[in-house]
């Protein structure tokens, strides 16, 4: 009887069992060896052409710091002589040095690097591989929003790098990163393109990164990312790491973006972006169903007296292309509009009421954009501040209880710079007014009188006068 029950159960299991057919590769594929011992695989011939096109950059900053006087001077013995007239802080100056890399782009000395490499530098020095001489460089222009800067040295007959069309870069392409990691000197590392079009990383305001697993370390910033033909496809700018060294996740600014911004910095000293005047967001899968399964940049609001308002864009419009170039996300639209100059006329393709429409719009200047929402940026005494969002708090590793505005840029030699304010500082109070939003900050700085500005930095709170 037991045998019958067991047999019945086995039969039932076969009847109701699920089956799956896996896809198998051809097991008869032959291995092809790239070398048979008769020759050595090498990219030396390619790299030899560009090794002198990537330079080492060292910078020097003179930083003013306020050192608090020791509690020793609070002793009553000293107070009977000095009363309460002892200064609470002693201004001091120290020299800070840093290293980076750069890429030669002209025979007469123009060099592209990262803005963060030369930001706030009082002196920039360049050394060229194979040349023991040090060249003092002049800052030509910089764009903090994309982290690109151009410097120049007085030297002729240099070897400029050749640019490759970064729109043609593919995942899996072999790449080389050249730079000066940890200050050890010119170094070449090797990898592949891991991804293209990386954005929303929270590294820069304008992001369209090429991701690579080629080891990139501190000091590589501003160096070259090259394809296997030795052509520039990007400028190395950032890594994701917990240790401070390469973890196989590096990012480079694509060469097309680099070329566009650097050209204007060289010609005009500044980079100006076009401005559309809309607030936008990404589209979820559910939301996409209302637009025929299309993705793009969804308009959530249209600013008053903006180019978008003038041509009739509305909340709910889904922008899917600019001048025929596909837009599949909010970041893509932001980056694309940012490549146009103020005054340029572009054709927007968008979906409204399930119909595809087009409009021509003349872009305004991003620098003249009205401050309509709390997502804008305000400049005061040489420092630029932005809202301290939950995302920024997470990126900076600070408590969610901290409120204020965050310093995103400091102009060299400005009052804020002279007072020792740093990028990343959080302004929490001005005079007796607590700062909880950008509007609070704007109200607090209205008067022209000097003000006490309270700053939160790495767990400490201090005040300066601006």
Image (cartoon, rainbow, N blue to C red):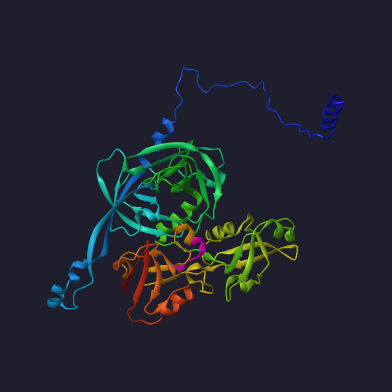
Query: Where is residue 9 drawn, in percent x and y?
Result: 83, 31
Query: Where is residue 319 drawn, in percent x and y?
Result: 65, 61
Query: Where is residue 201 drawn, in percent x and y?
Result: 51, 54
Is residue 180 visible in the rendered image? The answer is no
Is residue 219 visible in the rendered image? The answer is yes
Q: Nearer the viewer, residue 410 or 271?
A: 410
Q: Residue 86, located in which quarter of the rendered image? A: bottom left
Residue at x-position 36% and y-position 79%: 431
* Left or right for 34, reference 461: right
Q: Which quadrant would the C terminus be assigned to in this image?
A: bottom left
- Residue 371 lies within the magenta run: no
* Left or right for 461, reference 252: left
Residue at x-position 18% and y-position 67%: 72
Q: Residue 277, located in which quarter of the rendered image? A: bottom right
Query: Where is residue 345 drawn, in percent x and y?
Result: 58, 65
Magenta-tinted stretch: 385-392
- Residue 388 lies within the magenta run: yes
Q: Nearer the viewer, residue 422 or 331?
A: 422
């Amino acid at each position: 009887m037991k045998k019958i029950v067991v047999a019945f159960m086995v039969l039932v299991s076969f009847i109701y069992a699920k089956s799956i057919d896996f896809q198998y590769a051809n097991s008869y594929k032959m291995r092809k060896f790239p070398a048979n011992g008769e020759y050595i695989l090498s990219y030396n011939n390619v790299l030899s052409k560009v090794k002198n096109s990537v330079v080492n950059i060292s910078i020097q900053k003179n930083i003013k710091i306020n050192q608090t006087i020791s509690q020793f001077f609070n002793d009553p013995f000293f107070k009977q002589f000095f009363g309460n007239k002892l200064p609470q802080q002693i201004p001091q100056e120290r020299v800070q040095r840093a290293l980076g890399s750069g890429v030669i782009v002209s025979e007469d000395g123009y060099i592209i690097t990262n803005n963060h490499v030369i930001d706030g530098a009082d002196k920039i020095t360049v050394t060229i591989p194979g040349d023991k001489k040090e060249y003092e460089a002049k800052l030509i222009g910089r764009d903090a929003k994309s982290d690109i800067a151009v410097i120049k040295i007085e030297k002729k007959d240099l070897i400029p790098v050749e640019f490759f069309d970064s729109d043609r870069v593919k995942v899996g392409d072999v790449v080389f990163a050249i730079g000066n990691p940890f200050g050890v000197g010119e170094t070449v590392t090797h990898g592949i393109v891991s991804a293209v079009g990386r954005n929303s990383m929270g590294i820069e305001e304008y992001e369209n990164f090429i991701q690579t697993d080629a080891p990139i370390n501190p000091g590589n910033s501003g160096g070259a990312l090259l394809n296997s033909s030795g052509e520039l496809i990007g400028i190395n700018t950032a890594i994701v790491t917990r240790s401070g060294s390469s973890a196989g996740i590096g990012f480079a600014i694509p060469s097309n973006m680099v070329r566009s911004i650097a050209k204007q910095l060289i010609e005009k000293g500044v980079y100006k972006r076009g401005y559309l005047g809309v607030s936008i967001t990404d589209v979820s899968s559910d939301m996409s169903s209302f637009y025929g399964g299309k993705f793009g940049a969804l308009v959530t609001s249209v600013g008053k007296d903006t180019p978008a308002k003038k041509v009739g864009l509305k909340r709910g419009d889904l922008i899917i292309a600019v001048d025929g170039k596909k837009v599949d996300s909010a970041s893509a639209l932001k980056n694309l509009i940012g490549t146009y100059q103020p005054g340029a006329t572009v054709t927007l393709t968008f979906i409204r009421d399930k119909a595809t429409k087009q409009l021509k719009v003349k872009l305004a200047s991003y620098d003249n954009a009205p401050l309509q929402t709390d997502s804008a940026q305000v400049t005061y005494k040489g420092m630029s501040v932005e809202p301290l969002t939950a995302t920024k708090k997470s990126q900076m590793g600070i408590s969610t209880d901290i409120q204020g505005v965050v310093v995103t840029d400091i102009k060299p030699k400005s009052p804020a710079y002279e007072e020792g304010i740093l990028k990343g500082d959080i302004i929490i109070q001005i005079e007796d007014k607590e700062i909880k939003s950008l509007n609070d900050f704007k109200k607090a700085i209205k008067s022209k009188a000097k003000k006490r500005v309270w700053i939160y930095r790495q767990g400490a709170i201090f005040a300066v006068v601006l």
